[in-house]
């Protein structure tokens, strides 16, 4: 009887002593996750923290090296908001971003609709349209600088043949911003083409057949069928294009350096000029301008996430 009663007790004691061991799958998951976390911390979290810290202190070259810059709070933000460059830079950034996004999306969508028909040489032409996207930005920007040169540029040569007076594309305050916008549109079209083309291929052809049976053809089919079904892809395309365009620096700096007379200065070029373009760099205000760009991109990203969540719930 005692042996019978002791057996369950030993089994219960043994059950209490046995601790749950972590599964090997959990360790494997952490092993795969660790490189991503390390990468995000080193290349995203720490630079972001450092940029915020720079914007809250009065850094000079000496204090930047020694690390003893005094804390100034939001003085750098107040300084850039009160700077005479802030208003024009905000307007130029808005114009540069909005005009680029609209034309990149519209032209990219038109090309995607054209190529989705899968005619002969369609794949070859699509590959050629990817060239602007694949070229290094310094090459693309330098090419546009040569093409828009006032004296020896191809564009003015063509205008001369047509009897039009030469345009000072890069040296005129009236044309410098439009020049960099044109170059940025050309560079961004392939990205919109690729993403929207993929979205169009994902639409079931049966839906188009049903629409044709209901009498929806041409523009009506596009607005009632294609565009609504393409809306999720369109939203992420515009969002990524917005984030990219807000931070465009290479094109503007190579072509105009933000000039002449600040006529093509955006937040990106202004931030660089404050931090690195002077003999006495203003690291704090430059970081503050950069943080404004980060906050702007973050706001639009949160709006996108909120809209997508509402659509999912509905």
Image (cartoon, rainbow, N blue to C red):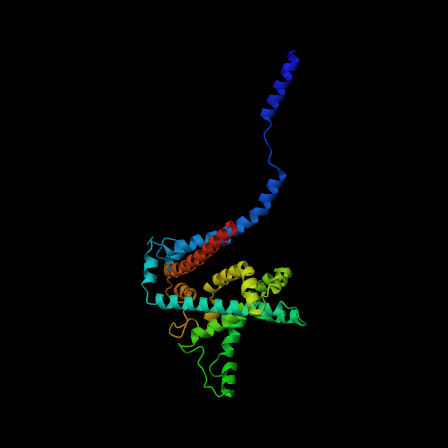
Task: Reply above or below: 155 against 87.
Answer: below
Residue at 35 percent of width and 66 percent of height: 87
- Pick whichever, 264 or 256, lies toward us: 264
Most extreme residue toward the top is 1
User: Residue 204's image quarter?
Assistant: bottom right
Instruction: Give residue 96's position: percent from left, percent from top.
Output: 44, 68
- Pick whichever, 37 or 180, lies toward us: 180
On screen, residue 210 versus residue 166, left or right, reads: right
Which quarter of the rendered picture does the N terminus lie within? top right
User: Is any atom of residue 10 visible in this view?
Assistant: yes
User: Residue 69's image quarter?
Assistant: bottom left
How many numbered marks does the figure carry? 0
- Pick whichever, 13 or 309, lies toward us: 309
Most extreme residue toward the right is 120
User: Is any atom of residue 250 visible in this view?
Assistant: no
On screen, residue 11 versus residue 71, left or right, reads: right
On screen, residue 200 versus residue 48, left or right, reads: right
Task: Reply above or below: 125 against 33.
Answer: below
Instruction: Give residue 218's position: percent from left, percent from top.
Output: 58, 69
Instruction: Give residue 288's position: percent from left, percent from top.
Output: 38, 59
Instruction: Give residue 37's position: percent from left, percent from top.
Output: 53, 48
Residue at 59 percent of width and 47 percent of height: 32
- Pick whichever, 191 or 107, lies toward us: 107
């Amino acid at each position: 009887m005692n042996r019978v009663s002791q057996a369950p007790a030993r089994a219960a004691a043994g059950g209490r002593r046995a601790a749950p061991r972590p599964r090997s799958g959990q360790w494997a998951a952490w092993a795969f996750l660790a490189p991503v976390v390390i990468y995000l911390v080193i290349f995203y979290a720490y630079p972001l923290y450092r940029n915020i810290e720079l914007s809250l202190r009065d850094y000079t070259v000496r204090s930047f090296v020694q690390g003893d810059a005094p804390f100034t709070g939001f003085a750098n933000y107040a300084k850039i908001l009160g700077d005479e460059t802030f208003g024009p830079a905000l307007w130029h950034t808005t114009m540069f971003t909005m005009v680029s996004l609209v034309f990149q999306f519209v032209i990219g969508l038109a090309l995607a609709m054209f190529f989705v028909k899968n005619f002969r040489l369609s794949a070859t032409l699509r590959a050629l349209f990817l060239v602007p996207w694949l070229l290094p930005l310094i090459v693309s920007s330098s090419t546009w600088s040569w093409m828009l040169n006032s004296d020896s540029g191809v564009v003015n040569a063509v205008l001369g043949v047509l009897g039009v007076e030469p345009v000072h594309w890069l040296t005129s305050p009236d044309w410098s911003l439009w020049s960099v916008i044109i170059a940025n549109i050309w560079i961004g079209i392939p990205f919109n083409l690729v993403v929207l083309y993929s979205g169009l291929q994902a639409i079931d052809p049966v839906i188009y057949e049903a629409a044709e049976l209901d009498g929806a053809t041409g523009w009506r089919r596009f607005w009632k069928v294609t565009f609504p079904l393409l809306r999720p892809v369109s939203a992420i395309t515009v969002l990524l294009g917005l984030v990219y365009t807000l931070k465009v620096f290479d094109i503007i700096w190579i072509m105009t350096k933000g000039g002449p007379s600040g006529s093509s200065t955006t937040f990106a070029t202004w931030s660089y000029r404050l931090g690195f373009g002077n003999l006495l760099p203003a690291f704090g205000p430059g970081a503050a301008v950069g943080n404004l760009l980060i906050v702007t991109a973050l706001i639009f990203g949160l709006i996108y996430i909120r809209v997508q969540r509402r659509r999912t719930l509905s």
